[in-house]
Amino acid sequence: MLDSAVSLGYGFVSAITPFNVLMAVLGALIGTFVGVLPGLGPTSAIAILLPVTAALEPSQAIIMLAGIYYGSMYGGSTTAILLNIPGEASSVPTCLDGYPLARQGRGGPALGIAAISSFAAGMLGLAGLVFFAPFLAEQAIKFGPPELFAVMLLALTVTSGLTGGSMIKAAIMGLSGFVLSLAGLGTSSGLFRFQFGVPALSGGFEMISIIIGLFAITEVLKSIGERQPPVPADRIGSVYPSRSDLKQSSGAIAAGSLIGFVMGLLPGCSAAVTSFLSYDVVKRFSRRRHLFGKGAMEGVAAPEAANNATSSAGFIPLFSLGIPASPPLAVLLAGLMIYGVQPGPLLFEQQGGFVWTVIASMVIGNIALLVLNLPLVGLWARLTAVPFGIMAPVILMLSVIGAYSVRNSLFDVVVAVLFGFLGYFLYKFDWPVMPLVLCLILGPMLEQSFTQSMAMSADSFSIFFTRPLALTFLMLSVLMVVISNLLVRRTKRRLQQEGAGQISPLS
């Protein structure tokens, strides 16, 4: 722990440089903006800005992209409380008490409690990241190719938790992503594969183009024509909660933070699951149980703390094992690899300066969220009145520029547009895209570690079952599929009970 504290101190020395602070604050503000606007989520925003950040150093780019992620977790509470519009499933519990509070003229204090809960949970998650991630990475240094293969297989089972749908559909989409990753130069053979006579495919499919298409362009196609109701200005009031509000919410903040952090360590356990779970737990043990659903401040504090703690905890498996626990982190994983940063067991040892700078910047970003967003609540609230029809052309323009700028190729723009339409049809017919994206990202590493494992064992599969760590991760993969399905089913039932069937899974 002492080593982690010292390393974090060095990280702060780098993180407090003016430009890094600017990136952290800018990312937090953009994230809040993204969370406030229904129709745009952190996954889409990160995908759009990946090419834009190419001009930055890797640490500066990841600082800003991470800020967008945890900033959007806070921003989503604004529409949930003021308009009863949850942009994603994790915001549904916030609506249950946040909107009644807004109708009572207490929307401001509810937003203030949401900000304080987000800050407290985010700081707890970062404390866990500081002390748990290096330990997990230190143990993972012992991994060989069989263990790495088993860990990546575990990462792929995360897709069952990320999709919330059919395992068969997830498997088909995952296989499609793996096939797409095979295009181009083979990692082991050195030969070109799946070119189909198209010279542009000699370098394979550009990951950013596919991600921009599946998320940014697809979101535009899904959201065109949607109209958002105007923000009722009289529902805001003072954003500073009273002492009684803070006293009533303190236990809920602590419970939500703890539940969100512990559950967030499980790859595939989404913020929707933890927010519902924390809401249920706090309601069950509250002395003011009769007020839940009618305007209980604890009903806002618990889920907001949980989903922010979950987002912070998700960085632990991402940094130490290379396993993304949510769709935005899967896109962030792609960004790390594009910048030449390989998340996993050796990250803290080989690129310690980078990772500790990013972690320290997240502390700065969370402080900026609290300090800046409380006075800006009125501004953010009024931004919800911006029709998506105005935002759509801007997003499309940025998407085309981003897809073209990576390799200066119109082929990549065509790929982005085609995958945008493909993503729209997949959405209409309820086919998950995250398994495709995750397998596209992990495909080359999975192939390489499997090839090396086969070479070590003279083409015998027994190597995966005779090495204790590899066998443990394989068993965890099976267990994770079972747990994820149980949690997803439970969350689906709660969504149906709360009348959230019309929520679009925007991110």
Image (cartoon, helix red, strand yellow):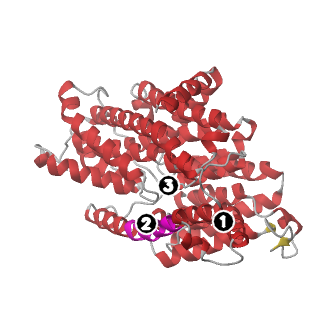
Q: Which amino acid is tagged 2?
A: Met
Q: Is residue 22 left or right of residue 300?
A: right
Q: Does dot 3 land on a helix, a strand or a loop?
A: loop
Q: Is residue 56 left or right of residue 323?
A: right
Q: Position of residue 177 (x, y in %)?
A: 65, 69
Count the numbered circles shown.
3
User: Does 500 appear in magenta?
Assistant: no
Q: Position of residue 286 (x, y in %)?
A: 14, 45
Q: Which amino acid is tagged 1?
A: Leu
Q: Residue at x 53, y 56 (%)?
A: 327
**How many C-alpha atoms fall within 10 Å of the one at disc 3: few (<14), some, or many (≥20)?**
many
Contact, CB < 8 Å: mark 1 with mark 2?
A: no
Mark 2 or mark 1, which is nearer the start of the sequence? 1
Q: Which amino acid is tagged 3?
A: Ser
Disc 3 from disc 1: Cα separation: 19 Å
**How many C-alpha atoms fall within 10 Å of the one at disc 2: few (<14), some, or many (≥20)?**
many
- Numbered tag placed on residue 326 in the rendering: 3
User: Does 472 appear in magenta?
Assistant: yes
| Viewer-nearest residue: 359 or 147 | 147
**Residue 347's image quarter?**
top right
Region of the chain picked out in magenta, as a range: 471-484
Contact, CB < 8 Å: mark 3 with mark 1?
A: no
Q: Position of residue 136 (x, y in %)?
A: 50, 47
Q: Does dot 2 land on a helix, a strand or a loop?
A: helix
For disc 1, the marked residue is 446
Q: Residue at x 29, y 67 (%)?
A: 493
| Viewer-nearest residue: 495 or 267 | 267
